[in-house]
Image (cartoon, grey):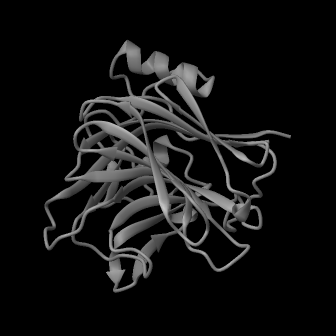
C-alpha cells in the first residue's frame, strides 16, 4: 500500500508556483499562514530536526512532537518566513557539526509516525518531492539526501542533491559505502528562483532524479544492497569558516514523501 505524506500547500506567491505544487503533490493549492510556526503549515509528524547548535560533535535535535502545531518549535535556524509562509532553514558556516562532517546543517531527518527512525529497504519504490528556493548560499548547499541507515558501519549518503552559488544543481552519487562521490550537473536555476526536485529509488537498483520536469537515471552499486535508507531535506551547508553571518538559507514550499 502506498503511503503519501504531504507536508505543505504552497504560499499564495503567484499562479506559477501554485500550479507547480498542484502538479507536484496531486493536491489542491492553498495558502500557508505566515503567522504560524512551520508545524502549523506542514505535517512535521514524520520528521526530526537537526540544528547547527549544541555541544561539539553533538548537534541539537528537535523531536517530531515538538515541531508539530501552529505554536510548534521555531527559532533563528528553522522558522516560517513572515512574507510567504515558507518553511525556512538557516545553516551558517560556523556551527556545531556531526562527528563525521565539517559542515553545519539545519535539516529534517525522516521518521516514522510512531516516532521511530525511518529505515527502509532499497526494494520497492521510494520518492521525495520538493518545491523550494535557495535564498542565499556562500558556495553550495545540499538540499536533499538519501542517507544510509542500518546494515553496516558506513555513515555515508547514497546521494546528495546540491545547489551551487552559480546556479548549478548537482547530484552527487556515492560510489560505494566506503566513500567517493561522482557528481552530475542536472540543472541550473538562478539564486532566489523557485524550482522543483524529485529524488526516487525504483526497482531496488536505480536512482530516478527529476529536476524541473527533466528526469535522469543512475545505477545503484550492489555494495549498497545490505543498507537501509532514509530521506533528509533542508539546508546542509557545504562550506565552513568562522563566520556566523555567511551560510545557506533555503525556503521550502512543498515536500512529499511516498513509499510503495
**Who's the residue at 29% across and 51% down the image?**
140
Relative to 205, 6 lies left or right: left
Please say if 256 is above or below 15.
below
**Who's the residue at 34% across and 86% down the image?**
56
Relative to 232, 119 lies left or right: right
Q: Looking at this view, is 176 or 116 the one in front?
A: 176
**Who's the residue at 86% across and 40% down the image?**
1
Relative to 113, 185 lies left or right: left
The quarter holding residue 260 reads: top right
Q: Looking at this view, is 67 or 162 the one in front?
A: 162
Residue found at the very far right of the displayed protein? 1
Relative to 178, 163 lies left or right: left
The quarter holding residue 11 reads: top left
**Who's the residue at 25% across and 30% down the image?**
190
* Whole-percent x, y for residue 31 in the image: 43, 27
Please say if 237 is above or below 22.
below
* Whole-percent x, y for residue 33 in the image: 39, 35
* Whole-percent x, y for residue 85 in the image: 35, 37
Amino acid at each position: 500500500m502506498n503511503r503519501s505524506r504531504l507536508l505543505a500547500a504552497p504560499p499564495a506567491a503567484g499562479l506559477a508556483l501554485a500550479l507547480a505544487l498542484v502538479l507536484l503533490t496531486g493536491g489542491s493549492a492553498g495558502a500557508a499562514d505566515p503567522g504560524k510556526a512551520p508545524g502549523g503549515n506542514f505535517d512535521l509528524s514524520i520528521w526530526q530536526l537537526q540544528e547547527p547548535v549544541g555541544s561539539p560533535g553533538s548537534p541539537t535535535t528537535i523531536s517530531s512532537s515538538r515541531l508539530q502545531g501552529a505554536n510548534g518549535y521555531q527559532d533563528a535556524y528553522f522558522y516560517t518566513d513572515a512574507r510567504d509562509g515558507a518553511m525556512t532553514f538557516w545553516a551558517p558556516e560556523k556551527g556545531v557539526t556531526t562527528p563525521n562532517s565539517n559542515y553545519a546543517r539545519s535539516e529534517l531527518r525522516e521518521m516514522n509516525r510512531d516516532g521511530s527512525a525511518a529505515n527502509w529497504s532499497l526494494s520497492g519504490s521510494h520518492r521525495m518531492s520538493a518545491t523550494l528556493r535557495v535564498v542565499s548560499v556562500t558556495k553550495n548547499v545540499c538540499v536533499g539526501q538519501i542517507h544510509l541507515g542500518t546494515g553496516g558501519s558506513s555513515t555515508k549518503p547514497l546521494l546528495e542533491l546540491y545547489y551551487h552559488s552559480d546556479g548549478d544543481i548537482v547530484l552527487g552519487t556515492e560510489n560505494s559505502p566506503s566513500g567517493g562521490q561522482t557528481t552530475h550537473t542536472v540543472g541550473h536555476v538562478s539564486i532566489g528562483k523557485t524550482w522543483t526536485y524529485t529524488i526516487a529509488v525504483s526497482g531496488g537498483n536505480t536512482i530516478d532524479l527529476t529536476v524541473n520536469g527533466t528526469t535522469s537515471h543512475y545505477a545503484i552499486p550492489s555494495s549498497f544492497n545490505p543498507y537501509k535508507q532514509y530521506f533528509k531535506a533542508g539546508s546542509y551547508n557545504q562550506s565552513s569558516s568562522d563566520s556566523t553571518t555567511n551560510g545557506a538559507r533555503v525556503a521550502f514550499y512543498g515536500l512529499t514523501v511516498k513509499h510503495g
